[in-house]
Structures are given as C-alpha cells and as structure tokens.
Image (cartoon, helix red, strand yellow):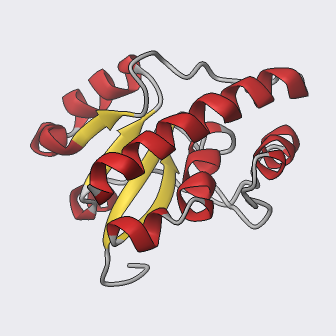
Amino acid sequence: KVSNMDQIVFICTGNTCRSPMAEGFFRALGGEEKTGLAALSAGMYTSDGLPASGNAVTAAAELGADITSHRSRMLTPELAREAKYLVCMTGAQYDNLCAALPDCADKVFTLTPADVSDPFGGDLEIYRRAAAEIKAGVQSIIGRLAG
C-alpha cells in the first residue's frame, strides 16, 4: 500500500499511455490535496515495470504533468478491492472490469462520457489530443469529488 489514504486508480489497457497521464494530471492539478485520495494507475493487460511511452511523457509535460518516473503495474484484484474508485478510459474497459470483479462494480467509473481512444503507436498529435481529453476528464472528477 502506498499510504493509508484512500486510492483512486486510473485504469487503461497497458498502463503506459492513458492511465499514467490521468494519474499525473490528478496529482498536477492538486487532486490528492483537494480530494484526500492518493492517485495510482494500472493496466488490465500489461507487465509490471514498463516506462510510460515517450509521446505520453511529452504530451503530459506540455499540459503540466511529469510522468517520467512512471512504471506500469498490472491491476490485481487486491488493488481493485482496496481502491475507493476505479476510473477506466473506455466503456469496454468498464464492462470488462465489472464482469471480472463484480464485487467492485459499484466503484467503477469511466473518465469521460465518451471513450478516450488509445493513442498507443500514434504520433505526438494523437497523444496531445488524448492528453487534453484526459486532463479535462480529471479536472471534472476532481471537481465532483472535492465538492
């Protein structure tokens, strides 16, 4: 466990692009202080220890978040059960997560009403678009949880 704070875990497929950016923006926007939640991120299908993709690091940095030290982690049932909220990037991830861990379904959310499409393998422009969507989604979540 990172701390005794409740955790909000941002989830995507590989935990090298979207969810690390979401975690980074949550911290950069003061989300931990405003909500009392510690930010983490994890991937549904990944290996532990991979760095964030170079374009994700660049796109996040341009919008104020430093994710250079990020390393991927697999979403485990334990991590999911300990979290207060699980925030997915797409409706399909939401469905998969609720199906895999039905006891966690009441704390699973999507970051934005529309899917944040996976920028993996795309150029910097595609990552910038994803980063802007993610940052806006994170801002809105902090607003709701801090209220």
The image shows residue 105, relative to residue 31, as above or below, that is above
Q: Quadrant of the C terminus?
A: bottom left
Tell whether 30 sits left or right of 101: right
Is residue 122 visible in this depiction of the protein?
no
Would you place residue 118 above or below residue 13 in this image?
A: above
Closer-to-camera residue (39/13): 39
In this rendered view, identify the residue nearer to me: 133 or 84. Answer: 133
Residue at the location (24% across, 64% down)? Answer: 82
Check the image and name the residue furthest to the bottom: 4
- Horizontal side of residue 59 vs 38, given as left or right: right
Residue at x 38%, y 44% (from the top left corner): 141
**Residue 93 lies in quadrant:** top left
User: Which quarter of the picture shows residue 108?
Assistant: top left
Q: Name the spot of residue 45 as percent of width and height, x first.
A: 52, 37
Across and down, in percent, residue 97 comes to 29, 33
108 left or right, relative to 17: left
